[in-house]
Image (cartoon, coloured by chain):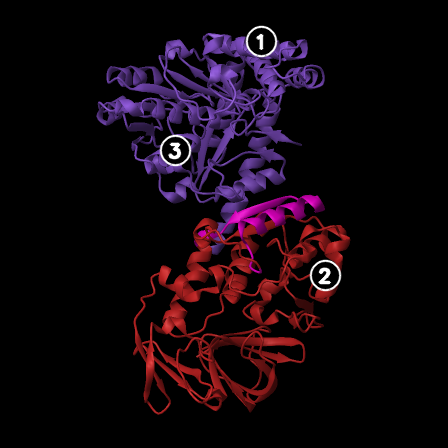
Amino acid sequence: MSGGVDSSVAAALLAREGHEVIGLSMQLYDHSASQPRGRARSGTCCTIDDLHDARRVATRLGIPHYIMNFERQFDEQVVSNFVQEYAAGRTPIPCVHCNGDLKFATLASRAGALGAPFVATGHYARVEKDAAGLYLLKRGVDPSKDQSYFLFTLTQEQLSHAIFPVGALEKSTVRELARELGLTVSDKPDSHEICFVADGDHASFLEGHGVRAAPGAIHDISGKVLGTHEGVHHFTVGQRKGLGLSSPIRLYVVGIDADRGAVTVGPREALERTDLTASRVNWIAGTPPSPGARATAQIRHRHREAAVSILPLEDGRVAARFDEPQLAVAPGQAVVFYEEEVVLGGGWID
Amino acid sequence: MRIYFDHNATTPVHPDVADVMGRVLREHYGNASSVHRLGQEAKAVLDEARTSVATLIGAEPSELVFTSGGTEADNLAIRGVAEALEPTGRRHLIATAIEHEAVLVTLKALARRGWRTTLLPVGLTGIVEPGALEDALTDDTAVVSVMHANNELGTVQPVAELARLAHARGALFHTDAVQSIGKLRVDARELGVDLLALSAHKFNGPKGAGALWIRRGTRLTPILTGGKHERTRRAGTENVPAIAGLGAAARLAMAKGAAEGERVAVLRDRLEEGILARVPGTVVNGAREPRVPNTTNISFERVEAESLLIALDLEGIAVSTGAACSSGTLEPSHVLRAMGLPTHRAQNSIRFSLGAGNTEEEVDYLLEKLPKAVDKLRSLTARRA
């Protein structure tokens, strides 16, 4: 229970159905340290106020509620990866690690030890069991809220313990339910930013975590130097704002070479890619699809899925060829494959 | 089943205390500073409570200042003395590393304003060595603050000896006796201290009432200024019902005397021995003597205390780990850390603190449930490892 609407309603729905529900919240980072200027941070999660909200909701539902301290695990498994990836010029997705390595790993096993066989979250996704007894991960019903992209690392084992009560609902219905249930969180804004980065200021956060601000050159695709930058950690592939360059055409970051400290910019067309490879692939069914299998793929959370052919490779890798060129294939993001609404699997873009 | 083994956090209000408070709330609503008879009645309620608390700790009623609780009493003692002695040039404060935050954070606050501070170390016993104080004392030490009994371990500090050492160097001595009042016989003069803080809710009184005993003649600057309440040492209309509750709790503590401590000690020892015998990989943190009779702090190897606490709560048993931060999650206990225990051990530790309502059946229920809960949590760690 993050203190937000979705997990609150998820808990409420299960309690209403008569399940024995234990509310758990994760304290993930030192709140005082993450809010150095005492600024209120709206639209994030897991602040001290959010934890209090979660407790209020649990009290309202009449369920026990505990806040588990996962600061160390979060730092080791999520934050440090985020920092390393950025420092390496890649664009990480901490939410995926938080789901797969914390919520449906450490938290789930703690819950198991308390006698709870299932872990429910407020994710907009669905788990179903098919005729063969295989667990399927499916998109949430509300297309604008679907979060299946962030859950692609879940294994059959993890899915067998997972419940997503709001996955079958529209967000508007969830808010309505929250109001009906008298939950004070019904009007809380959705969270968008990365929760542990105050004010969305990635660069300051990374520098606070030991990433050195090493200046370097910004050049175009022909190699011509257009300007300088304060460190590659200020950039992600596809970024357009904050380049500090004047140019008759819109320029985008098209490549980051962390070793050389170089940032390459180019026109929109230079961002287009048809092929990608990805590593550490998880196939939800446990086995890869056959070579050449047709599917759709998403290369970031807000990406509109596009038709693709899948070629599974050795060593848990995969190659994908899109029918149409896609913009901003960012290393470090995930490619997640779908067949209709079903998540086939995904991996980390090389 | 609801079993409460967290009496060092707070205690249930005794029914007699609740009765007294209810009566005062309903009938004696006057302002104790008012001239009319309703005011006089309220004043009489305060006087009675003051006499009761004074008797409990062997003090004069006029030496007591009622406060909102232990934290305020500690603040008044340390800030009040530090400020009163400021013109004398005594700008050094000493406390132990295992004090309650009410003392530790107050020292930090004063350190930011120019006072020098020294925290005395403790070893694995959880008891401060007099030699450490001797080494730390200087000619400009204003006040030494050492808790009587530690809230997490229950260990009793050699306050009388430490107070003598402090006085020998001209420093004042404050003791936070919040965890010993009601558990041990405490006589402020025998302890030889100058200031002593206590809190009602730790001995079956209400929350929001406490007192600071200030030995007659001790210079102290008030931290709350305003009206001439409490002999101008603590301004603000007195919380008469809560103070009446404090007085009633003090009378009950006196009436129970040493017998209750002996009864609780038997239960605590049964619980402690039972855990050590039935759960492998357990060890008591800190010295087992001298300790208040109700407390034991036990490390469970390869068990996250947080999970064990929750598992026990789901079985209806309320226990605690040492420290809880503002959101109610765990931070490694500063007390266990100060003793030199590694972080993992500090995060393996559960505090059991017994009290008036506890019975042998309750202890046995815990001894039945706890080993199973520990086994379950350990099998989980083993699987993951």
Q: Which mark is residue B104?
A: 3
Chain letter, disc 2 residue: A
Camera sees residue A335? yes
The chain whose colour is purple is B
Q: Position of residue A173 (x, y in %)?
A: 75, 63
Task: Please say whether residue B123 is one of the residues in the magenta stretch.
Answer: no
Residue beneath disc 1: B48
Chain letter, disc 3 residue: B
Circle 1: element type? helix
Specify the quadrant of the image occupied by residue A217.
Answer: bottom left
As drawn, B348 above or below A339 = above
Circle 2: element type? helix
Tell me whether marks 3 and 2 sit on the same chain. no
Q: Which mark is residue A174?
A: 2
Q: Name the tint of chain A in the rendering.
A: red
Camera sees residue B120? no
As drawn, A111 above or below B66 = below
Locate the C terminus of chain B by quadrant. Answer: bottom left
Instruction: Identify the residue shown where x is 40% and y is 82%.
Output: A255
Tell me whether marks 3 and 1 sit on the same chain. yes
